Image (tube, rainbow, N blue to C red):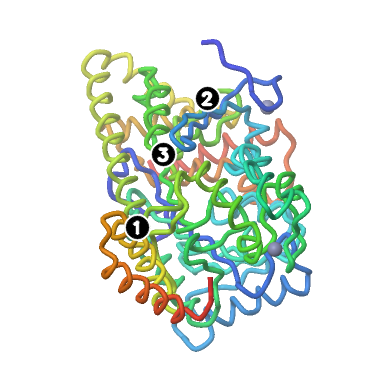
Amino acid sequence: MKRWYIDKGPDSDVVVSTRVRLARNFEEYPFPSRCSRQQQREIIQKTVDALTGDDLELRKGFTVIDFKNMDLNERLVYVEKRLVSKELARSDQEVGLLLSNDEQISIMINEEDHLRIQCLAAGMQLEKAYEICNYIDNLLSQKINFAFDDTFGYLTSCPTNIGTAIRASLMLHLPAITMTGQIQILLETCGKLGLSVRGLYGENTEASGSMYQLSNQITLGKSEQDIVMSMKTIAYQVTEQERLLRKDIMKKNGPQLEDKIMRSYGILKYARALSSDEAMERLSDVRLGIFAGLITGLDETDINEMMLQIQPGSLQKYSGRILGADEMEAVRASYVRNHIAAKE
Amino acid sequence: MVMPICQVCKKREATVFLTQIINGKKTDLMMCRQCAGEGYKIDLNTLISGLLGLGWENESIGPATEIACDRCGMTVDEFNRTGKIGCSRCYEVFREPMKVLLKRIQGNTRHQGKVPERYAADHAAEIEVERLQQELRECIRIENYERAAEIRDRIRQLEAGRGGRK
Ligand SMILES: [Zn+2]
Ligand SMILES: [Zn+2]
């Protein structure tokens, strides 16, 4: 599989990406916040050994990232690519990271739990992502005794993750549901079904770029398969609703929508300064335009990549230095201009 | 459109909305970007903090606040402050209040998912014991003492087989 942001996944008109992660803890150590630095280092070493011990193929497929000695901006880039959590990036503890070379699987070490096994994929691929996490978990379980209780299941540092310790998330692009003011209803409905929905990337407007993250809240009392399947069912309904509304808006307000999309495209092509919010908003319009057949030079992977690269850490990496606020907006605009020009 | 105000700092506009169901009760959280920026765990932690030890004070073991984990030293107070458990042993030490807490935040107390290979037999036995205990109660109710005696023996057998690991 390719990196999620340059891959075209199933249902990618609405589902941008899938993420599944499992939390696991070593039986013989206290949870990370109560571990000594020496214990934390042992945990990293044992995890690396367990994963890459005998299997040469696997060893070649993964890189041990020296996350602890990485500078802050470099860490931020990993967060923006969704490969690690903000908590790991901010931690001053002995944190570790094992990353598959295709950036699909990451294992965070000594975050809130000893291990967070995570799989990322493009579009709607919940089952596949879970299978991969499960495979890695089985592999590690051959060498590591994970904390488990007959009644409570896999034990975690926070009781909100206990049991299956699975968190499945989908990143959804919902411009039509947002435009028609139905997002509040959606939030409430999903809430009633035990899922949480939160806006992604937002700063001053709600969920800038109309990007939302749907995740399961309940981790105890249902099997992993049930959790994944019920989430998939709900996500399909949301996806269908979004598609219907897109068609409906196109039918009733076609010219206005087309104008909005093409103006946004124009701004991205020519602007000399872009705030993060504006860039997200315009990219969201263009993404909609791509699936409406209005814009042909770009595809959804370009949008994924731009949405990722216009985040502060990635822009600073791109320009090789720390940027002030004005500079940031100029560099952002120039990055977007160049990306689009290269495609046309 | 008028934006709601962040429930955490009560100053900035709320732009992040979190809806969750906790034991059948819907909870809405609205936060600003800054307050929510820590990721999607902080809100849950504030919600669960203060819950451990509820409904436990009057049990024979004494006040919950005086108990500490014999392995890592965590106390109920500490958990209520941080929302984080100290070690896997804590779940044993605080098993009863933890059940109350889990019932509230997860709506469930019994794991139904994956079981690590080395626990599989134990786990199956535990589930079987639970089922038999239910049947036993039913047998006593309908005064089928012969069957009840059989079930009791089977439960003893299963529990002995699990080697006292709870
Ligand atoms: Zn706030
Ligand atoms: Zn403990």
Query: Does residue A157 show up?
Result: yes
Mark 1 surroundings: few (<14), some (14-19) or many (≥20) residues within 10 A: few
| Residue B154 position (above or below residue B80) | below
Marks 1, 3: nearer the viewer: 1
Q: Residue shown at 34%/45% (left/top)?
A: A231
Q: Residue at x 44, y 25 (%)?
A: A264
CA neighbours of label 3 inside 10 A, class few (<14), some (14 to 19), many (20+): many
Eye-nearest disc, 3 or 2: 3
At label 2, the amino acid type is Glu
User: Is disc 2 surrounded by few (<14), some (14 to 19) or many (20+) residues within 10 Å?
Assistant: many
For the residues marked 2 and 1, what is the alpha-carbon distance in whole angstroms?
55 Å
| Residue receiving disc 2 | A206
Residue A54 position in % (x across, y down) = 49, 89
Residue A194 is labelled as 3
Image coordinates for residue B144, horizontal then vertical, percent: 25, 63
Residue B99, compared with residue A184, is above or below; it is below
Measure how far apart labels 1 and 3 are at the Cα level.
33 Å
Secondary structure beneath dot 2 equals loop
